[in-house]
Image: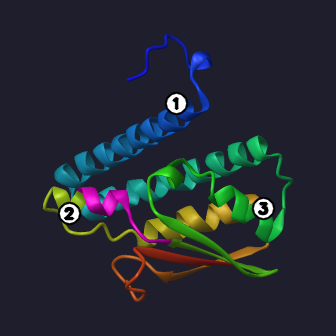
Amino acid sequence: MVDKDRIEDLTKEELIKLTEVFAKNWIAHDGSWFLSIEEEEGIDTAIKYDIEAWRKFTVVEAKRIMGFLGLEKNSGVDGLRRALAFRLYSSLNEDEIVVIDDRTVEYRVKTCRVQAARRRKGLKDFPCKQVGIVEYSLFAKTIDERFETEVVSCPPDIVEKDYYCFWRFRLK
């Protein structure tokens, strides 16, 4: 429990915990609106709206992270590596960001809070591939317009059993 009245009074450790609380709140809101549409209109309609929401949000998120980190536009593999580590849900999922070479970086998600929540509720895995293609492609292109994004593995097409999803980004 925190016995403080203002964010400015929090310790470093308390601020880190608070970022996790904020991220959990955000992902709960994201899931709530998605499930509301899914229950009323079906998963295809929910995915349609999710894609449009991510089309807008991921660019805003990338630009704000760039500003926070002081990244210049077209900052390459190192810029994307750094930006991926600061995404809103980075504190919630166990992931790996691996630089393969000076033109390629991979993002591998080992645990996924969204899929875990759906399973707890008795729901099927969210087939997030088509949403992820928009989300990750636009995030990477906002960091550096030269990036091409490849989905290696993502529901419903999981081919890498050790990861929920697996993305590869290459500079053209």
Q: Position of residue 86 (x, y in %)?
A: 63, 51
Residue 24: image location, x then y, percent: 40, 42
User: Can you give x and y, in whole percent of width and height, for residue 54 in the image?
Assistant: 51, 54
Q: Are marks 1 and 2 in contact (CB under 8 Å)?
A: no
Q: Which mark is residue 97?
A: none
Label 1: element kind: helix
Residue found at x 86% / y 53%: 72
Callout 3, which amino acid?
Answer: Gly
| Residue at 82% in and 80% down | 102
In the drawing, does residue 57 fall left or right of residue 146? left
Label 3 secondary element? helix
Q: Earlier in the sequence, mark 2 or mark 3?
A: 3
Q: In the displayed image of the protein, which residue is found farthest to the bottom?
A: 159
Residue 159 as seen in the image, left or right of residue 12: left
- CA gap between label 1 and label 2 equals 30 Å
Question: Which amino acid is tagged 2?
Answer: Arg
Q: Which residues are magenta?
A: 109-117
Placement of the N terminus among the 4 image quadrants:
top left
Left/right placement of residue 152 relative to residue 124 reads right
Tag 1: amino acid: Glu
Q: Which mark is residue 14?
A: 1
Taking the view exactly as shown, the residue that stands out farthest to the left is: 122
Residue density around tag 2, few if under 14, some if 14–19, many if 20 or more, within 10 Å: few
Label 3 belongs to which residue? Answer: 79
26 or 100: which is nearer to us? 100
Q: Are marks 2 and 3 in contact (CB under 8 Å)?
A: no
Q: Which residue is mark 2?
A: 119
What residue is shown at x 63% (from left), y 62% (from top)?
A: 138
* Residue 37 appears in view: yes
Dot 1 or dot 2: first in sequence order is: 1
Q: Quadrant of residue 123?
A: bottom left
Neighbor class of circle 1 (other Cα within 10 Å; few <14, some 14-19, many 20+) is some
